Amino acid sequence: MKVSIVIPVYNERAFIEEVLLRVQATSVDKEILVIDDKSSDGTRALLEDLDKAQSEGHREAVVQNGKARLSLNNIRFLFQAQNGGKGAALRRGFEAATGDIILVQDADLEYDPKDYGTLLEPIFDGRADVVYGSRFLGGPNRVHFFWHYVGNKFLTLLSDIFTNLKLTDMETCYKVFRREVLQNIKLESDRFGFEPEITAKISKGNWRIYEVSISYAGRSYAEGKKITWRDGFSTLWCIIRFNLFG
């Protein structure tokens, strides 16, 4: 089965080359869809250069100041006309994806593509339709913000109360779906509300959901972390909205 790896990108110039190299190095049969959400830090210019090189027939590009070569064979670059948020970028990627399985990958280095084997195994084995990669099931984690941990656990608990699912990490980036799961769901959230929305909507279907342990190397705000307390309140509202009102 082919895996579509969907990567929403916004202002990740410092990390995007390394992320693409790591994703490309994985052994799964894949296509990589990179959706730039109107980046303003040089990320978009870099991706446009890679897209141009690909359109001119180049099979690889030199990245990381000449230190590495990135294969362009199975990458597709999509560019948002305006900044719409992670959810909007993911919708664009999901619509363009052609794989049997769709995997969400953030464009920073918090989540490691080396975990793809663990994430995909339940689907490859025919046991699961949806897989969540949990940061709280014992995998190696960079020790970071206590209150982020508390906030994540609270939002996951509240989501579980509404959905009747026993998840430990609703907010995780690493979510994997059989194609037919997403084909049966209409997504609306533009920003980080994607996480509670997709969780609420898959809970209403007859889907087999698995959760597996992943590694996590959380960033500080100085390193580029974007989610804030405002997104926490937005997530709280999305949990209520999408579970009670569709």
Image (cartoon, helix red, strand yellow):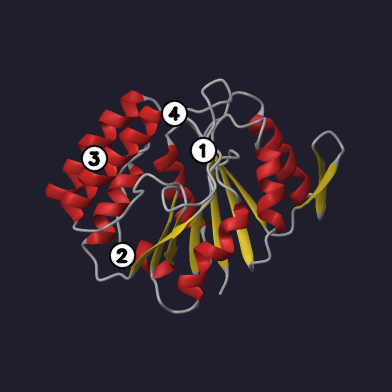
In terms of depth relative to the viewer, which is nearer, 117 or 191?
117
What element does badge 1 sit on? Answer: loop
Structural distance between the alpha carbons of marks 2 and 4: 36 Å
> How far across and down, in percent of the image, does residue 191 sit?
37, 36
N-term mark: 2 or 4 = 4
Where is mark 4, residue-wise?
145
Q: Quadrant of residue 67?
A: top right
N-term mark: 4 or 3 = 4
N-term mark: 2 or 3 = 2
Q: Quadrant of the N terminus?
A: bottom right
Checking the image for residue 209, the label placed there is none
Where is mark 1, residue-wise?
80
> How far across and down, in percent of the image, does residue 33 sit?
58, 52
Q: Quadrant of residue 150?
A: top left
Marks 3 and 2: in contact by CB < 8 Å?
Answer: no
Taking the view exactly as shown, the residue that stands out farthest to the left is 244
Residue type marked 2: Asn
- Residue at the spot 48% in from the left edge and 78% down from the top edge: 125
Q: Nearer the viewer, mark 4 or mark 3?
A: 4
Checking the image for residue 238, the label placed there is 3
Residue type marked 4: Phe
What element does badge 2 sit on? Answer: loop
